[in-house]
Amino acid sequence: MIGLIQRVKWAKVEVDDQIVGEIRSGLVVLLGVEQGDDQAKADKLLEKVLNYRIFADENGKMNLNVQQAGGSLLVVSQFTLAADTQKGLRPSFSRGANPTDAERLYDYFHQQAAQKIQTATGQFAADMQVSLQNDGPVTFWLQV
């Protein structure tokens, strides 16, 4: 399971010109589900996302996690993160989970997140327009 996290000042997701998810300060989590991923991996990734210290403390050092910084999560499904880009000029998605499993784990991830922190989401398998102001920019690739 892959989480590409971006520290943001604000972010939103639109589907058909309607905002379906929006946050102020916090993290955008682009979530890629791979074959073999399960709830244990989702729990491990969520724990890492919530505790990753990438927000500034009173001394300006990256020493606070998203909860300590008073932020929120915006979780967006992103199957292209599971792409194999090693050969050729066209990505292969053979490592990605099938849509049924991916949606189940995406739903599980954001439901678990919502029990711990204010969480907004995109819409699984939709053509989404994601807008954000990356703070820093600060972006990290987390994989479990």
Image (cartoon, rainbow, N blue to C red):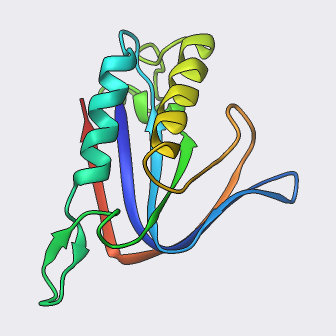
Residue 112 rendering spot, x and y as whole percentages: 47, 35
On screen, residue 103 versus residue 113, left or right, reads right
Q: Nearer the viewer, residue 95 or 24?
A: 24
Using the rendered image of the protein, determine whether residue 129 is visible from the camera's viewpoint.
yes
Residue 113 rendering spot, x and y as whole percentages: 46, 42
Q: Residue furthest bottom?
A: 59
On screen, residue 135 versus residue 103, left or right, reads left
Q: Residue at x 30, y 35 (%)?
A: 45
Query: Where the N terminus falls, by quadrant?
Result: top left
Q: Residue at x 23, y 67 (%)?
A: 54
Total labels: the figure holds: 0
Using the rendered image of the protein, determine whether residue 87 is visible from the camera's viewpoint.
no
The correct choice, above or below, for 19 with respect to 77 in the image is below
Q: Residue at x 47, y 46 (%)?
A: 30
Q: Residue at x 34, y 39 (%)?
A: 46
Q: Residue furthest front?
A: 115
The correct choice, above or below, for 7 with respect to 20 in the image is below
Give the image quarter of residue 42. Answer: top left
Q: Nearer the viewer, residue 25 or 99?
A: 25
